[in-house]
Image (cartoon, rainbow, N blue to C red):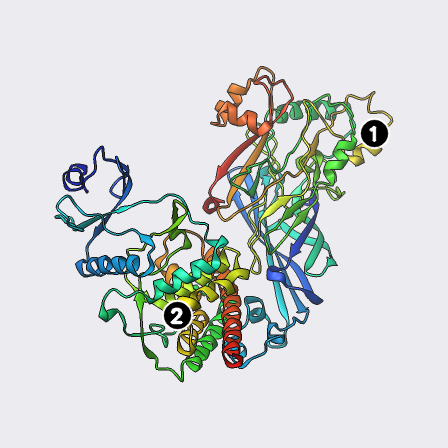
Amino acid sequence: MNNEGSTSLSFPMKEGIWLDRGKKLDELLTLSLEPVIDVDEKEDEVTVKGVLQLFGEYRPLEKEESTGNQASSLVDQSAFRSVEEVSLSEEGIGEIRHEFPIEVTIPRERVARLEDISVEINEFDYVMPEKGFLEITADLSISGVRAEEPVSTSDDAEESTEKELAREDRSFTFEQVRKVDEKEPDQLFGVSESSEGSEEEDSSEEEESQENELTFQEPVTEIKREPSWLDEKELVGTIDVEEEEDHAPKVSFRSVLDEEETIEVREEPEASHDNDYQKEVVKAPRRFPKNETRKLEDEEKSTESNVKDEEEREHENALYLTKMMANEAEAYSKLRMCIVQDGESLDMIADRYKLQVSHLMRTNRLDEEQVSEGQILYIPSRQSSSTS
Amino acid sequence: MIKIELLERSYPFQSIRWMIEGKIMDTNKGMKAVQLWKDEDLLAWHIKWRDALAEHTGIMTNRMIQTITGEKVLSTDLGFITVHDVVEEAFPIFDHPKQIGQFLGKYLACTATEEDDREVPIIPDLERDFDIRFFEDLSQWDILQKLNLEAKKRVTKVRELLKNHSQIVYHNIVPPIESLIQARSIHHQLFWETSEKKPISCYEALRNVLHEWHTEGHGAKIKEVLDGIDETFPLSEERGTALLANCLYPWELRSFVANALDNDGTGTMEQHFQSFAQEWDISRQLVKDVAGWLVNSREGVVQG
């Protein structure tokens, strides 16, 4: 393996799970999180796809028997166990099974050898803020990904990077697949990437969005997710991606560089052995105004003093979550994002994605058809669950 | 295809047009449903049963509208055609649990012919095992296996409940109640849209109604429904036990297996399993409710 320039992509994940059908944990006995992935090569992409399998054992709280008040032979004679009770082992140990699907697409040129690709759980912890609710945090890393270029401060390198990034900026899209309420096909994630000349900017609004919380709930399971910020440099693999962002994408991402490539964060519908659930974001999504850019915290720290002087490019991605709910007729929604280029109109973009202008306007909450260069547009599409 | 012209010639309606081809038509006298029957015996039974229901309960139902010549059935090359009133407004059943119970009791007691009070098993194929091998690839396979074992215990308990009763008992058959949506409202009066399906045991029909009542989130009113039923269809010792046995029997597993094998493409296996699991827990609560109601009811009789 050629380790030169090789690095790993790291991102934290935070998930909350409501246990099914009113399960109440008295004691959590074991808990494990294990990645099960396949690596596929397709043309100029390498896809890392699979699930993070959560498995745990718990001792449930003793339930009061319903026959307490009217214990009778007939009631006892006809009583049978609930699904949860049946699921318990002979020793009365319950099992938690849950899968978090992940899919990461990496440009082929970033991968020297497919065999080197692996997903690892670096850290893993949990808390039980309340009975029946499990909050899991983990740091995931995908190793075997080659950094495209070392970070360089030389003029040549900057020029080169500048040209390349200018090309890359042409098409930066971001996809996520999620369950969405048919009635509220709201946008799900957003990724913002500034193009050249991004102004330094930090806003409390962005900080707020980091606190956005995504909740998946039914009676059963709830997954809370904090909004994620993903450093573009991580995505493009030109910096040390071991440096973790607190708010990196929780599940997966896809990063591609040229015009045909995309950066994709995708979360597939999560299948649970124990639970089925709906997803919902607790807080409203934050939206980016035109040309809004964001500096990541690490960048801010390192370049705070000289950012105005240098013409370095800051390429930022912001992930945030928006409200979504799922019902019986859940579908998976794929959301892309594009940056409006000079001379592009809403008509052209709608045509490109085979959408109606009104649909685009509604999705992006636009009051008029006017768009301007650098504006972020969300490109929704819908696909059936069977194809997700 | 059923031709509009034939219907216009045969029924006292004008300006007929299809709203749903072959099923629902709009006429100068309102919407009408068109039903095509292949089984003449079943049709004959339904004609009698619906007439009996209307007479027995005083409730309007979708009886066969007569042709211009006074016939209830139009015989065609396609089969036998009947036409029925369509009522669009739903009856607010959950606001009237006891009254609905009273109606259901009359419904269950309604007989079309002498043969309807016949010897039929309370639960058909009670001894039949559920073949779950088909689901070995299901991610919930382990749980399904355990539920299958529990289902067998439920069947054993059903057998136990019925041991003092004959497995084959003399009881009524009625058209299945597929959904409480069949309760319609016309001028604030109940209009019952009777199913055209083959008749089933009245206990199975009742179990399905109560299960749906629970599924719709109105389990708290089940006791009122049972009170109402008891007034018109006394759930005495044998009837109450037969109902309880039907609630206890794992119909949901039977249905899950059948649906999955049919593979009707309405969902993934996992989704079917989730529905099954939810139905299982609803059945469990329903059994508690019915058993508890029976205990109270019988204690009341003893004390009274």
Name the element at disc 2. Answer: loop
Q: Which residue is mark 2?
A: B131
Given this view, does label 2 or label 1 mark the residue nearer the observer? 2
Say above or below: A265 vs A121.
above
Image quarter where the N terminus of chain B lies is: top left
Tell me residue A74's x, y (percent).
Answer: 51, 79
Kind of residue at disc 2: Asp
Query: Foreground: A193 or B124?
Result: B124
Q: The numbered mark 2 sits on a residue in which chain? A: B
Residue B44 left/right relative to B55: left
Tell me residue B152's x, y (percent).
Answer: 45, 76
Q: How packed is label 1: few (under 14 Cα within 10 Å), some, or many (20 or more)?
A: some
Is label 2 in contact with label 1 (beta carbons under 8 Å)? no
**Image quadrant assignment for residue A344:** top right
In the current view of this chain or complex, which residue is farthest to the top? A343
Q: The numbered mark 1 sits on a residue in which chain? A: A
Q: Give the alpha-carbon distance from disc 2 to disc 1, as whole Å.
A: 67 Å
Say above or below: B297 vs B103.
below
**Image quadrant assignment for residue B166:** bottom left
User: Could you say which disc has been placed on residue A303 in the image?
Assistant: 1
Say above or below: A5 vs A293.
below
* Viewer can see residue A4: no
Residue A123 left/right relative to A49: right
Say above or below: A300 vs A127.
above
In the current view of this chain or complex, which residue is farthest to the front? B304
Tell me residue A339's x, y (percent).
Answer: 61, 25
Kind of residue at disc 1: Thr
Tag count? 2
